[in-house]
Image (tube, coloured by chain):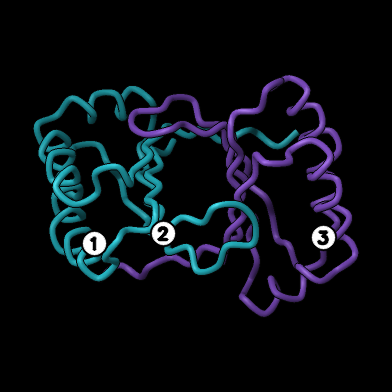
Chain colours: A cyan, B purple
Amino acid sequence: MRMIALYKMPPDPAAFDRAYFGTHLPLLAKVPGLERTVVSRFTRTVMGEGLYLMAEMFFPDLATLKTALKTPQMGEAGQNLATFADGLTTLMWAEEVEPS
Amino acid sequence: MRMIALYKMPPDPAAFDRAYFGTHLPLLAKVPGLERTVVSRFTRTVMGEGLYLMAEMFFPDLATLKTALKTPQMGEAGQNLATFADGLTTLMWAEEVEPS
């Protein structure tokens, strides 16, 4: 399953990118149980209020995600995020709906 | 690449699901060039304002997506969406950032 982070457009995208890719992603990569993180840029908004960036954090299962959220590594990544993405971040668990 | 649809929490989730899975997804499946659609439910909000549902529409490339957006099938899917998801929908193009 995935934990999804959505980021609103930051006031200074270049500064956000430096902090996000230079500092935050390396901290996130240390979180136990996290298999991989896929980051995507939203390149065009067709409808609604556009966002800036999405991160998909892949975990093997819900139990591993729950454990990961309580680790010091996740705590450090979260504290780091608050230094540059305060008010921009939505963080949710996502579970795929099986095709019927 | 993907086109991502994000849906806010609908006033009547059961009615939304009936329309979305029963009518909208079958219309979307007819869109030429669309490889597959992965639908996920947001099961918990850890931070920020939570959302309800995400649909990831996979296209082989940007040109195919651009062409698909102009097809009558996509028009029909969009008109259908407006009948039950008005004001709930954000629709964006997403491009993965290559890992550095």
Quarter of the image holding residue B62?
bottom right
| Up-down relation of residue B96 to residue A90 (above or below) | below
Residue A98 spot, x, y in % from top left: 65, 33
Tag 2: amino acid: Tyr
Gap in Å between the C-alphas at discs 3 and 1?
Answer: 35 Å
Dot 1 falls on a residue whose secondary structure is helix
Residue B74 is labelled as 3
**In the shown orientation, is residue B48 left or right of residue B16?**
left
| Up-down relation of residue A65 to residue A6 (above or below) | above
Report the residue marked by disc 2: A52
Report the residue marked by disc 1: A16
Residue B91 spot, x, y in % from top left: 62, 54
Q: State yes or no: discs 2 and 1 in contact (Cβ < 8 Å).
A: yes
Quarter of the image holding residue B7?
top right
Gap in Å between the C-alphas at discs 2 and 3?
Answer: 25 Å
Tag 1: amino acid: Phe
For image coordinates 62% across by 49% down, the residue present is: B5
Tag 3: amino acid: Met
Residues indicated by labels 3 and 1 sit on the same polypeptide chain: no
How dense is the environment of label 3, judged by Cα within 10 Å: few (below 14), some, or many (20 and up)? some
Dot 3 falls on a residue whose secondary structure is helix
